[in-house]
Image (cartoon, rainbow, N blue to C red):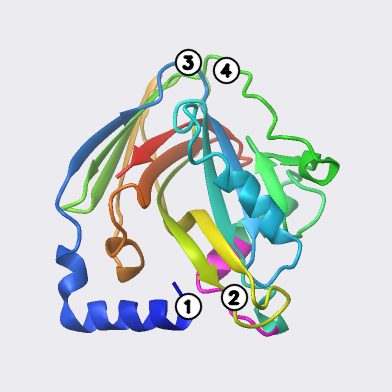
Amino acid sequence: MRPVLYKMLLVSLVLSGSFSAAVAAQKLLFNSGPAKTQLIELYTSQGCSSCPPAEKLLSDLVASKRLWRDFIPIAFHVDYWDYLGWQDIYADKSFTDRQRKHFQLGNISNVYTPGFVVDGKEWRGFFRGRDIPPNNADLAGNLTLKWDSESQIATVNYQSLGKKPEYCYFAILGFEPGVVIQAGENRGLTLNQDFIALQVSRAPIEGEASHYQCQATLKMTAASAHLSAHSRAVVSWVTDSLERPLQATGGWW
């Protein structure tokens, strides 16, 4: 879908009020199990000429039987390349800030795209033609995510194996095939955009000992509500104070 038409569709849905009813209400439950689920972050931009191969690496994971169980990929679209002539329709300053925070915490050596952060650590294997590193599947405790699309409330319960979580995140991911880039470094390319972070929310964690919980409202927007089943997902993860994931879970919505 061409970005211009995509934006027109979103405006039309919002003005008509139909986007809130575009998705049937669902109550879903996702469970990580005790083994650690790997969180794969990709910092990318539609205006970055070296990003399409990195995004394809994520797209190749869509059909994997290990998806959601062994790993959860998320594509954070940053805004610092928009000045090159193409404004990324998924870019958000908060995602740029998130990448910069990884840098400030020492999790990555620099701020750049495409940039991979795997389980809170910089991964440069992509530039050497390597696949995503295998999950070590250490025991990490059980993370349960409840998602009610009618109330738009997401709730997490985490049974830790000892390490106290500091932050709790919720996100809605989108999947858009055939996005045509009309200007900038990728002008003329048609890209499949998968695992796009459309909405991300951080919530305070409550509880003590090994039982923690958090809750957030993920406000439905046209950017997520127009997507059909298996074109969107809801995920959650908990991290330590250095933004290193302790556990993650989620799935198709």
Q: Does residue 160 belong to the magenta stretch?
A: no
Residue for badge 4: 137
What is the three-letter code of the residue carrying label 1?
A: Pro
Instruction: Measure the alpha-carbon separation of dots 1 and 3.
Output: 45 Å
Mark 4 Cα within 10 Å, few/some/many (few <14, many 20+)?
few
Label 1 secondary element: helix
Residue for badge 3: 161
Residue 91 lies left or right of residue 214; in this view the side is right
Q: Are marks 1 and 2 in contact (CB under 8 Å)?
A: yes
Q: Which residue lies at the image location 27% right of the left edge and 62% below the top edge? A: 225
Q: For the N terminus, give its image quadrant.
A: bottom left
Instruction: Measure the alpha-carbon separation of dots 4 and 3.
Output: 14 Å
Label 3 secondary element: loop
Q: Which residues are magenta?
A: 85-96
Reply above or below: 15 against 162.
Answer: below
Q: Mark 4 or mark 3: name the one nearer the start of the chain.
A: 4
Reply above or below: 112 against 88.
Answer: above
